[in-house]
Amino acid sequence: MGMDSDIKLIDENGLRLDGRKFDELREIKIEAGVLQRADGSAYLTWGENKVMAAVYGPRELHPRHAQNPSKAVVQARYNMAAFSVSDRKRPGPDRRSVEISKLISEALEEIVFVEQFPRAAVDVFIEVLEASAGTRCAALTAASVALADAGIPMSDMIASCAAGKIDGHVVLDLGQKEDNFGEADVPLAIVPRTDKVTLLQMDGDLTTEEFDKAMELAVGACKEIYEIQRDALKRRYSTSLEGYEDFEEDE
Amino acid sequence: MKEIISKITKEYLYRLIKDGKRIDSRDMYEHRELKIQSNWIGAAEGSARVKLGDTDVVVGIKMDVGEPFPDTPDKGVVITSAELIPMASPNYESGPPREDATELARVVDRGIREGNVVDATKLCIEEGEKVWLIFIDMHILDFDGNLFDACGIGAMSALMNTMVPAEKFDLGEDYPLPIDHVVVPTTFSKIRDQILLDARLEEERISDTRLTVSTNENGNIVAMQKGLSGVFSYDEIRECIKKSKEIGEELRGRLANTSEEKI
């Protein structure tokens, strides 16, 4: 945030650098069950972002002292490939990815029925193969689909999206340049069925009104993303469950 | 954790091998289906995603400007690393590269370095001061055996579509990385007395020994690596080299045109 520049992020027609409107998402595509070895997996593209998520478990947790006798531990590992960004990233965890891994683990623990698997681990591995702003939201969104694909008992999926402020306007889903030169960024994640927030961060400078607007935009987008997540799962499993559509509109 | 295999699968594989058959009914010297999608990662200078059967790897190239090694002041530097990330197999753990990741990176590196794929003197910007650094990073997404060939092919393909980011360093316009030789590895596994190409995971688990031969377009051998504890006879080694040239030729044909392929 807040790098000074003369870059204009919004043109005279009220469109953003990539031609999007204020409340428009980048294109998001999700495919479930893309890896063979993992118990569950998902591949997500979100604009230029490419994110792969894999789930292993529930399985025995090592080291044993990390086990929780009353529930499973959800361990997410967010990792960026060395070639995913413009200046090569040194492989391995840095402070940023350790923090993101922690937040994602905590968010996911909220939806997984962890009490069903005492002492076990549910491992979620997220690889950012190409990064272009908004990777933590992309990672959490992909991880939720991978968990569902792995058949992990859970109450819902988590959908995540960021809103922010550029050139004085509150907008949805910041792109790379908007992230670098914008005034604020608010990544947010919700549990769509209960309308509760499981992840919220913010950096920059917003008034209360602006924050309300940003949250409203992000929540709306999360619900859109939730449909894309559900659709990915349906496409993955509809061949083996022909006629499934007839039963699912019960809610 | 070591890769384990059930006794019944093991015996089944041995029985098949004895009858000259493989678990997926391939010929002994036949690769699994190979898919290459080059230029997959926009943020990288060059990249390729390679699927060899169910083995799935991504190779990305990043370039930077740095200092040469004091003993080779007029040569660029190639740095190869492999990450066996825990996504790819229940037996991989996070953390610094272990033995097998290091061997993998070094075998791929040797093929590219010794095969003079990129003439290192062409990577010199200012002798003794500034040279190009090429980082080859290999990311394993799904592990179903034979990472050597998948990564070697991926690294070669990625280098072949690498654009040198000269503009970023005020060194003129971007230009394609000059490629002098096309080197591809072929990896043979030996199970009891049978030699086979491109072992999948079950086959790799019961392999006694392994030989990787990297060849260039002139049919010359540029790098070799024998791994695991078993042994080869002289004739077996000669046979592997002979096959490696034939198969290498075929693979080079594939590498010449990959940008259209989609995975």
Image: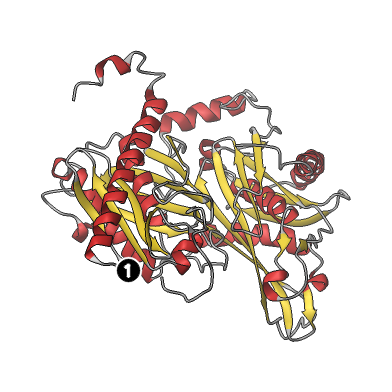
Q: Residue furthest right?
A: B218
Left or right: A1 as drawn, with respect to B35 = left
Residue sitting farthest toward the left: A70
Res. A74 in view: no
Could you tell me which residue is drawn at 24 percent across and 52 percent down?
A107
Near mark 1 (Cα within 10 A), the count class, few <14, some 14-19 or many ≥20, is few
Q: Is residue A16 left or right of residue B109?
A: left
Residue at coordinates 78% horizontally, 41% vertically from top-left?
B239
Tell me where residue A135 sits by quadrant: bottom left
Which residue is disc 1 drawn over? Answer: A203
Q: Quadrant of residue A134?
A: bottom left
Q: Residue furthest front?
A: A12
Of all chains, the one bearing label 1 is A
Q: Position of residue B121 (x, y in %)?
A: 82, 73
From what the image shows, is residue A198 above or below residue A182? above
Residue B44 location (% of width, % of height): 61, 58
User: Is A198 drawn above or below residue A248 in the view shown?
Assistant: below
Please tell me which residue is depicted at 39% across the width and 45% down the height of the picture: A54
Query: In this image, B167 relative to A161: left or right?
Result: right
Q: Quadrant of the C terminus of chain B?
A: top right
In this picture, is B8 found above or below A87? above
Which of B74/A102 is in front? A102
Q: Give amino acid for label 1.
A: Asp
Residue A221 visible from this viewpoint: yes
Task: Residue A206 in the image: state x and y as whole percent.
Answer: 29, 67
Q: Nearer the viewer, residue A129 or A159?
A: A159
Specify the quadrant of the image occupied by residue A112. Answer: top left
Label 1: element kind? strand
